[in-house]
Every structure is written in C-alpha cells, then in structure tokens.
Amino acid sequence: MTHHITVFAASADGVHAEYLEAARALGRGIAERGWTLTWGGGRNGLMGAVSSAARAAGGEVRGVILDRFVHMGVQCEATLDMEVVADMRARKAGLDMKCDAIVALPGGLGTLDEVAEMLCFKQLGIHAKPIVLVDTRGYWSPLLATLEHAVQEGFVREGLSGAVVVAATPHEALAEIERAFDAAAGASGSR
C-alpha cells in the first residue's frame, strides 16, 4: 500500500541552510520509502526543497496550490499532479483529505495555520493521522511551550501532547510515521 504524506513547510527563501537540508532529507526519505509526497505546490523555500528532493529520488509528488500563487509564478512547474484551488480552505482540505500522515517542517503563518487546524481536528476526533513536527534548530519549541501553557491554564484538554510527535530530525520523523503505520496495521490485523 502506498502511503501519502502531507508536508507543511515554509515558502520563504533566505532561511538557514540547516532548514533546507532537513527539508531535502525529508523529501528523499519519503521517496525512498515509496510514499507519495503531498505539499503546498510551491517551488521556493522549504516547500521547493522537499519536493525537489523527493522527485530527484524518484518519488511521486502531488501539489495543492492556490490559483493566486500560480498567477504569481511560484508554483513548481516540474510537478505533473498539481491541483489548483481557489482559497486556503480548499487548499488545506486538499492537503488533508488524501494523506495518511502529516509532517510539519518549520514555516511561517501558513504553516502555523495548517498545523493548528490539524491539531484541532485531531483533538476533536475528526482524524487520527500521525502529526510529526520536525524540530530543526528547536523551531517548534516556543509553540510547544505555548500549547503546554494552554493545557495548564485549562484552554486545551490534557492529552494534546499525545496528538503530536516532535522529532529532532527528518530521519526520526520518518521512523515515527513508520511506527504509527505499523501500529495501525497491527491494530487492524488483530480485529
């Protein structure tokens, strides 16, 4: 069975090289496992790095991009499977609907929005997909501290920490996803 992995990531250029290398390693790792990468369709920043690396490693990639970004010329033109949508809600739905797991690399407001929505959906029981944050350079630490503070103050239910896995490296993120897939296969096989 081919798994579909959605990756949320920055489109910004000019970020630290360590972020770009993590994105490339993640893209290669997804392709090497025979999984399909779904991402935001951009060619810049970490988005471009993850998709380029997956394609270079022989992987299948699928993009979901806003039509306004196509008109701005920031879409990845090397991807044949590109869904063009009218708004962010449709984009997030396209990224979420067909995936088996979600990995978030560092990113800006768009990435934060995507991560927050997927965590909310998981907490509400709308989905049970693994969500893994790749914590390159400690990027996600402030968000994790904020979430823990929200739990302590009673705004977020206990157990949110179990809704997300934090991985120090792309290799660890991929291993966590494999464990989740193995656990799900074991659970469905024992029924």
Image: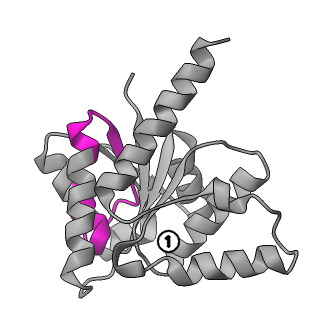
Horizontal placement of 161 versus 182: left or right? right
* Residue stretch in magenta: 30-51
Task: Look at the image and say whether residue 31 sits in the magenta stretch.
Answer: yes
Q: Is residue 29 above or below residue 153?
A: above
Outermost residue, left direction? 56
Q: Residues within 10 Å of mark 1 (few under 14, many from 20)?
A: some
Tell me, yes or no, if residue 163 can be seen here: yes
Horizontal placement of 62 versus 129: left or right? left
- The x and y percentages for residue 159 are 75, 58
Q: Quadrant of residue 15?
A: bottom left
Residue denoted by label 1: 111
Tell me, yes or no, if residue 99 can be seen here: no
Q: Is residue 29 above or below residue 70?
A: above
Horizontal placement of 85 versus 126: left or right? left
Q: Secondary structure at mark 1?
A: helix
Depth check, front residue: 84 or 167:
167
Q: Quick one: quadrant of the C terminus?
A: top right
- The amino acid at mark 1 is Thr
How many circles with numbers are drawn on the protein?
A: 1
Q: Quadrant of residue 75?
A: bottom left
Q: Residue at the location (66% across, 82% down)?
A: 146
